[in-house]
Amino acid sequence: MTVSKSPISAAPANFREVVAQNDVFISYSRRDKAFVETLDAALKNLNRDPWVDWEDIYKGEEWWKAIQRGIESANTFVFVISPDSVASAVCREEVSYAAECNKRFLPIVWREGFDPQQMHPAIASHNWLFFRETDDFNHALQELIQAMDIDLDHLRAHTRLLMRAKDWHAKAQNGSYLLRGHDLQEAEQWLVQGLNKDPKPTPLQTQYIDRSREAETQILKARQKAKWVVVLATVLVNMLLVTGGCFWLYGSASNWARRWVDRQLQDALNVGLAGISGDEFEAIAYEPPTPASQEFYQNHQDWLVKVNIALPNAFSRTYAPTGNPREIIWIGDSLRDTEAQPISATRFRQPYIVDPISQYWLAAGLIEPTITRTTYTDEFGSWLSICGPIQNSAGQVVGGLRVDFRADYVRQIEQQVRNRLLTAYIIVFIWLFILSLVILRVTRPPAA
């Protein structure tokens, strides 16, 4: 082929991306154009698609880039041997580029009389087909077709991957031009099989496929990492929700138990106050002992014992204030006359120095019913208390009633709830962990 070949039609935009494969690229000298026209027509009659410069170089397109594109897109490179083509520098460049692309060469002899020393090594090393005027054209054409069709799938894949690799290289190895998924798997299979076939894969094709695998591996790793992040975040969020739910349930159960005890305390206080005479209590607490006051004391004690019998978890005591705001005296005690004393009993009129913690609610109990908000524990168990005022017939507060209530029930409820929630928490955690492993196993990428 000579430099004088000229384009005759317009090229579409982005031609490299839309160019199709050709069955054969025909390299020839301008002086052999008549023969090439005959060969081109014969190939088209057999539904083959040859690349020739008078049809496939577009107006405004660089002729050498167009030729390179034509060689890349062709499955087979046919070189029309004649004295002029052997001597042509342009034809020699075409052969060199085809050899660089590892194209299949099918040299055909049209005219003899050339200098063998000028023959390109890639042409000299291949078997030739003879299309001389003295040869049977149709027979030679059939031989050419048969040679073109040998391992055609390999040739087409070679051409397709070469064109894509060239595009990738021309676009500064842009990652968007790399192979993905099924295309990559087929290319890798072709690369392995192509090592034992002709033409062999080019270094650029090998680099292109290797780089595609590296990119695919990175993408799969990134996706798997993202899946791990999503799964772990899901597990973490679920565990936080479960933890929050457990704390809420625990708080609800504890509050319910506490409210139940508060109601029991309030009921015990109301029952206790209902049977206490404020006038008799005043006579016991503030007047010198008399036979009448001794009777009042016994009635008072009997009532406190009855309250304890009716409410076994409630232990009642009465007290009266003194001139010292930090001191009270105990008047009645439901444990004073019993044999079993789970807590220490007090003596009649025994003074009691109020500690700073108890001072508030004991004093407040002389004004209105007041419940301790903190469970306290001693050697006899855990307790909650309530205090309420004792009033005489004139409506004056003359003392207070304190009810100590066993709070072990609250502790038992809280412990049971903690144990059950801990069990549920562990089960949920194990389930989410196993589910996460299953999800990751199902969605993990295939081995490279």
Image (tube, rainbow, N blue to C red):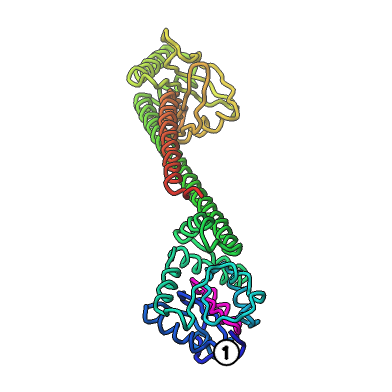
Q: Is residue 340 above or below residue 118?
A: above
Q: Position of residue 364 (x, y in %)?
A: 50, 34
**Callout 1: SS:** loop
The image quarter in which residue 263 lies: top left
Q: Which residues are magenta?
A: 63-85
The image quarter in which residue 396 lies: top left
The image quarter in which residue 427 lies: top left
Task: Name the foreground residue: 261 vs 233.
Answer: 233
Q: Is residue 74 above or below residue 1?
A: above
**Residue drawn at x 46%, y 40% as measured from the top left:** 243
Q: Position of residue 359 (x, y in %)?
A: 56, 30
The reply to whether the magenta stretch includes residue 83 is: yes
Q: Position of residue 168 (x, y in %)?
A: 57, 69
Q: Is residue 194 above or below residue 296?
A: below
**Residue drawn at x 56%, y 20% as measured from the top left:** 352
Please name the residue that numbered disc 1 is placed on.
5
Q: Going by the picture, which residue comes out furthest to the left? A: 310
The reply to whether the magenta stretch includes residue 143 is: no
